[in-house]
Image (tube, helix red, strand yellow):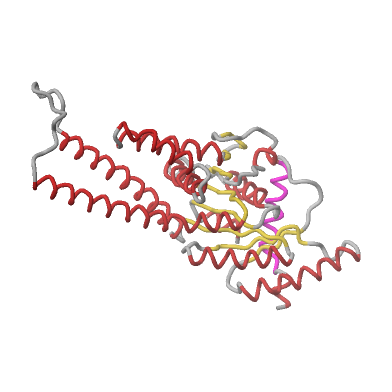
């Protein structure tokens, strides 16, 4: 179910509420796929990175080998935002008159903490990672931030593409208006010297307009490319990881609805750390309480495959532990979930 889903996809997003085991699931699925001979990249977009801790090595914002056939990458949100704003600053200052440079800097300094800046920067980095990695890897697994952040991120490609389309339309109208105004009077090319060494203002404006258009078209192409990847159900799927508790179940149902509205397919639900029935009265009572919560999940999302992974002894840290966790995932896929059989 989950492992076969990953085997049939090129891009897999793993998300859910914080603390439910998203990184372990993403890593175990990636490792299992690497063991089968595929080249896999696991990418963490969660600001509270656990990938390096789980693999017991420094990963950071660069591709790092985790196991044979498996690499890891932790996208640094702060660094990504700074690099995004630096690139925007360079582009805008190149296109705007020199006397407006200070104004550009002030606006971008304010934008650093503006709502949406962080998400837009991460989104561009995800799009860039997919563009570059899809030729080098058979599977890219994204270990995402907690539900709310991820839901906004999945909806952003369409919003950003529409926003860029609006900028392109305004830029085209501005070009047409400028051309009409220039047709009514002489060109403002006082900057051209008598020897012709300076280019007329008309040419400089035309170059600037074309550069703005190239930047906007490239931006739209990147967002539309990512949107196409997210909505291609044969190539991409989303896996929601949750605990068998009231709030994670409710949050997962809500996340599923948000992803569906964004056109993203939820291929599987992974209920992690399921309490056993045969390990004492306390855990048996806990198991029955979990069944009540999971009954709501099955009723709300009856057509989404569910994998219930049992609570395992020990921490899931290191390659050997992830192999064991992957084995537990595979075994859970063949079991009939208790809540489903009773519902």
The residue most toward the bottom is 343
Lateral position of residue 87 relative to residue 290, left or right: left
Q: Main secondary structure of the magenta part?
A: helix
Lateral position of residue 239 relative to residue 94, left or right: right
Q: Is residue 174 magenta?
A: no
Q: Residue at position x 53%, y 36% from top? A: 79
Quarter of the image that includes the N terminus: bottom right
Q: Position of residue 272 (x, y in %)?
A: 71, 58
Between 214 and 234, the one nearer to me in the picture: 214
Between 221 and 190, the one nearer to me in the picture: 190
Give the residues in magenta.
320-336
Lateral position of residue 164 relative to residue 11, left or right: left
Q: Position of residue 70 (x, y in %)?
A: 58, 40
Between 332 and 73, the one nearer to me in the picture: 73
Quarter of the image that includes the C terminus: bottom right
Q: Residue at position x 32%, y 46% from top? A: 216
Q: Is residue 160 above or below residue 258?
A: above
Q: Position of residue 31 (x, y in %)?
A: 62, 45
Q: Is residue 319 above or below residue 143?
A: above
Q: Quadrant of residue 204?
A: top left
Q: Is residue 330 magenta?
A: yes
């Amino acid at each position: 179910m989950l492992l076969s889903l990953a085997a049939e996809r090129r891009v897999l997003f793993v998300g859910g509420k914080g603390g439910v085991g998203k990184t372990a699931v993403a890593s175990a699925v990636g490792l299992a796929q690497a063991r089968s001979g595929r080249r896999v990249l696991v990418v963490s977009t969660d600001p509270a990175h656990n990938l390096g801790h789980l693999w017991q090595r420094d990963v950071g914002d660069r591709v790092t080998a985790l196991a044979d056939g498996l690499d890891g990458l932790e996208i640094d949100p702060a660094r990504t935002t700074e690099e995004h704003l630096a690139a925007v600053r360079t582009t805008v200052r190149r296109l705007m008159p020199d006397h407006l440079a200070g104004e550009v800097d002030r606006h971008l300094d304010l934008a650093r903490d503006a709502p949406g800046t962080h998400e837009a920067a991460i989104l561009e980095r995800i799009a860039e990672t997919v563009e570059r990695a899809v030729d080098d890897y058979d599977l890219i697994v994204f270990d995402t931030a907690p539900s709310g952040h991820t839901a906004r991120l999945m909806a952003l490609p369409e919003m950003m593409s529409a926003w860029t389309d609006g900028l392109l339309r305004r830029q085209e109208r501005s070009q047409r208006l400028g051309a009409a105004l220039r047709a009514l009077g002489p060109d403002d090319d006082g900057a051209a010297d008598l020897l012709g060494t300076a280019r007329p203002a008309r040419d400089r404006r035309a170059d600037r307009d074309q550069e703005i258009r190239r930047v906007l078209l490239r931006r739209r192409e990147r967002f539309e490319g990512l949107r196409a990847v997210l909505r291609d159900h044969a190539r991409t799927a989303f896996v929601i990881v949750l605990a068998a508790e009231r709030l994670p179940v409710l949050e997962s149902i809500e996340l599923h609805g948000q992803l569906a509205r964004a056109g993203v397919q939820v291929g599987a639900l992974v209920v992690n750390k399921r309490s056993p029935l045969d390990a004492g009265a306390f855990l048996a009572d806990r198991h029955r309480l979990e069944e009540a919560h999971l009954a709501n999940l099955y009723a709300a999302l009856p057509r989404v495959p569910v994998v219930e992974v049992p609570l395992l002894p020990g921490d899931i840290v290191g390659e050997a532990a992830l192999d064991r966790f992957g084995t537990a995932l595979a075994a859970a896929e063949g079991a009939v979930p208790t809540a489903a059989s009773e519902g």
